[in-house]
Amino acid sequence: MFKDRLPGILLLFFLSFQGIIIAQNKAELYISEPTHDFGAVAEVDGLASHTFIIKNTGADPLVITRVTASCGCTRPYWTKSPIEPGSSGEVTISYNPKGRPGPFHKSVAVLSNAKNKRTLLYVKGNVTPKPVIAAQPAITYPYSVGPLKLQTKTIQYSSIRPGETGEEKIPVRNESEHPLTIHIGKLPNYLTVKTNPVTLQPDETGEILLSFSSDKAKRMGRIYTALPVEVESGGNKKNTNGKIEVAANVIDNFTKLSAADKAKAPAIQFSSTLIDFGKLPEKSGAIIPFIGGSGKESEIFTITNTGKSVLSIYSVACDNELVAISSGKKELKPGVTTEYKVSIHPREIKTKIETFIHVVCNDPNGPVRLIKVTAEK
């Protein structure tokens, strides 16, 4: 008889157990805003975190059993103790932006004993990459005036307009065992030079600051000078002398010219932008006039004004003292051509020459033009 009742008893027990489970599963997990937008997140600021408030709106305690993130870049932290009915807990999500520039959208699953056993939370935003800081190149000092080391001994200002001032500097270093005092000789009125500091202690670095005033120069064209530099050493009785070469092209101010003005402007044209003397003879007498071909002491190039107004040639100059240039016309009407002769002295040339002739004019489409000069010894 018991065996006849056994199925009914088991069915009643199973239904009672189900009732217990149902009665114990009345916790409810509620989140008012399941998505958080961080907006812009700076990569350099590190972790971005947001805390979601979890509320139990059910009748039984809420237990968060586990929280899983969709990737390793997101770390969750949550309330481990049961959350009583009507009370609140927390789930904190931290996103690591390091090495992850650009937009992101990540999900986190909250597993609990609530009726909705799995609830998804979301964080999103856009990571602003950290600025790329270029490595500062190490300063080298390949030039010397006695014991004073310099980064360069040549300053080439870019084109300077009337009313402008060009600023340049030369890093210097004292690599000797004695203090060094820098003295700058007589200056042209358009240059201002300061040394900072005036006296360098052993292993100390400093600067030579140079300021070029176009207004004080009072002329257009290529302006070149060699500044005398004297270095006084505490360990030597005799000072060391050297020079710093400074050059600038002072040009017209074309910024206010209209398109119509430029259409009526002069235009400069060269017969060639390369003067190649080729291989020079080992011995030579006086300069021979140009007779054609390379390997000679003189070459000729021409300048033609192909524009519609007068071409003013402010200067045709080479900073290399081994190159001499004869003067041509300074003013060219439209269609007119002038000649310039370039000469060198082979006896004075010891190594290969590679230098430039600077032509400064009033062509607004190219106020500074270069002609390359080469010669082999």
Image (cartoon, grey):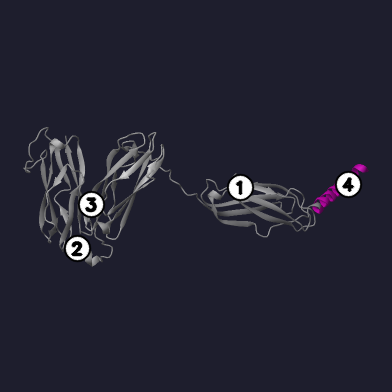
* Label 4 vs 3, first from the N-terminus: 4
Percent position of residue 87, x then y: 76, 57
Pointers 1 and 2 in contact (CB under 8 A)? Answer: no
Distance of label 4 from label 3 (alpha carbons): 115 Å
Q: Given the current orientation, which residue lies at the most extreme top position?
A: 282
* Label 1 vs 3, first from the N-terminus: 1
Name the residue at 65% across, 59% down: 33
Q: Which mark is residue 9?
A: 4
Q: Quadrant of the N terminus?
A: top right
Q: Which mark is residue 74?
A: 1
Name the residue at 28% across, 46% down: 185
Distance of label 1 from label 2 (alpha carbons): 66 Å
Q: Quadrant of the C terminus?
A: top left
Residue 370 seen in the figure? yes
Percent position of residue 98, x then y: 54, 46
- From the image, state whether disc 1 or disc 4 is nearer to you: 1
Residue 24 magenta-highlighted = no
- From the image, state whether disc 4 or disc 3 is nearer to you: 3
Q: Which residues are magenta?
A: 1-23
Distance of label 4 from label 2 (alpha carbons): 112 Å
* Label 4 vs 2, first from the N-terminus: 4
Q: Quadrant of residue 281?
A: top left
Q: At numbered mark 3, what does the secondary structure look like: helix, strand or loop?
A: strand
Q: Which residue is mark 2?
A: 265
